[in-house]
Image (tube, rainbow, N blue to C red):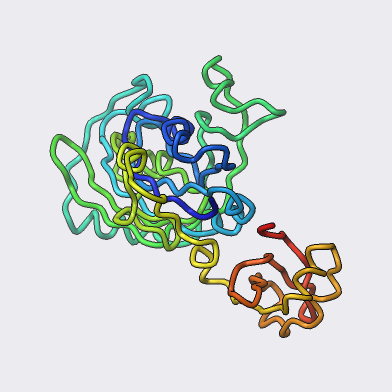
């Protein structure tokens, strides 16, 4: 069992809980997920099954898209609705034109300081554990990019949003920053992930539906999941040699298109054998073998 399984995670369950719920269908297959969703969030959770776990890092480079609700006028220690209220503030009136201009201001490359309530580690300890002890440590800002942002006024002092952003973006921090830009406080009250790279929520199913699914699970093949990478063919003989550690066969592959290209090695049937990366502009090195 190898491929990507698209799950529509419901609210109130952790990403690990989704995997546990599907254990009966997945059996002994190795499983990993492409980006954790907080328990209060819902939406697209792509699972890497079997050999697909070996290519997860290339899939994680993809951008993501979310929609949700921001509650204005209140801040929490976790920056979302699960936390304790830390302060309140008046909410100034805001027009559709102002929201449009605000959206434009936030689009583009920028930096973002990770929140204390996050899985990032300091000396091996997750930051959220330190935060629960009332300990706050310095966090270095990290580069992110907001590719697109739409804001609309909602009911009860809320904003509805739709955002496409780079890997590593904390939407909770974005919510707080948007509140500050308006002149008030804010926290994230609802979050739903709708896209991860080329994967879409419309193609996902709930854990319950997948557990009851008759027949093989609807797995996306590894090559299809990595369709953005150029396929480079090797003969069956060369594939055997590569699997035995003889990287010299990579010299027979077509030349790289760029100094930082990543590509797929495929066999005569089109199945993915390996992921390769460039060595300068002249050749390839093995990054990961895939399959038997």
Please provide percent x and percent y for residue 228.
52, 71
256 vs 124, nearest the viewer: 256
- The answer to whether any part of residue 154 appears in the image is yes
Q: Farthest top residue?
A: 133
Q: Which one is nearer the viewer's eye here, 108 or 180?
A: 108
Q: Going 50% across and 61% down the picture, which residue do you hit?
A: 221
| Front-most of residues 150 and 202 | 202
Q: Residue furthest left?
A: 155
Picture quarter containing residue 232? bottom right
Residue 224, position as x, y percentages in the image: 49, 67
Quarter of image, res 246: bottom right
- Residue 93 point in image, percent of width and height: 17, 43
Is 185 on the left-hand or right-hand side of 229? left
- Front-most of residues 47 and 106: 47
Which residue corresponds to the image point at 33% horizontal and 23% vertical from the top-left?
Answer: 87
- Give x and y (percent) for residue 156: 14, 34
- Residue at the far front in the pictured view: 215
Q: Residue at x 54, y 21 (%)?
A: 131
- Locate the C terminus and report the quarter of the image it occupies: bottom right
Horizontally, residue 66 falls left or right of residue 197, namely left
Q: Is 159 drawn above or below residue 87 in the view shown?
A: below
């Amino acid at each position: 069992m190898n491929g990507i399984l698209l799950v529509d995670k419901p609210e109130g369950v952790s990403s690990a809980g989704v995997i546990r719920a599907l254990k009966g269908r997945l059996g002994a297959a190795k499983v990993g997920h492409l980006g954790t969703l907080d328990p209060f969030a819902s939406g697209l959770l792509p699972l890497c099954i079997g050999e697909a776990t070996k290519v997860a890092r290339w899939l994680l480079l993809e951008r993501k898209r979310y929609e949700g609700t921001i509650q204005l006028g209140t801040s929490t220690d976790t920056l979302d609705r699960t936390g304790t209220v830390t302060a309140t503030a008046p909410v100034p009136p805001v027009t559709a034109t102002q929201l449009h201009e605000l959206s434009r201001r936030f689009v583009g490359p920028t930096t973002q300081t990770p929140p204390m309530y996050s899985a990032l580690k300091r000396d091996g300890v997750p930051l959220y554990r330190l935060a629960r002890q009332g300990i706050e440590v310095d966090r270095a800002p990290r580069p992110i990019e907001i590719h697109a942002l739409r804001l609309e006024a909602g009911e009860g002092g809320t904003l509805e949003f739709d955002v496409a952003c780079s890997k590593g973006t904390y939407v909770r921090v974005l919510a707080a920053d948007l509140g500050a830009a308006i002149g008030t406080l804010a926290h994230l009250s609802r979050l739903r992930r709708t896209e991860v790279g080329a994967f879409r929520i419309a193609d996902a199913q709930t854990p319950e539906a997948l557990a009851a699914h008759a027949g093989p699970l609807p797995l996306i093949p590894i090559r299809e999941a990595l369709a953005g990478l150029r396929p480079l063919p090797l003969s069956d003989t060369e594939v055997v040699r590569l699997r035995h550690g003889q990287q010299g066969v990579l010299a027979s592959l077509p030349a790289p298109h760029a100094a930082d290209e990543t590509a797929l090695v495929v066999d005569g049937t089109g199945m993915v054998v390996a992921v390769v990366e460039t060595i300068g502009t002249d050749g390839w090195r093995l990054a990961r073998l895939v399959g038997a």
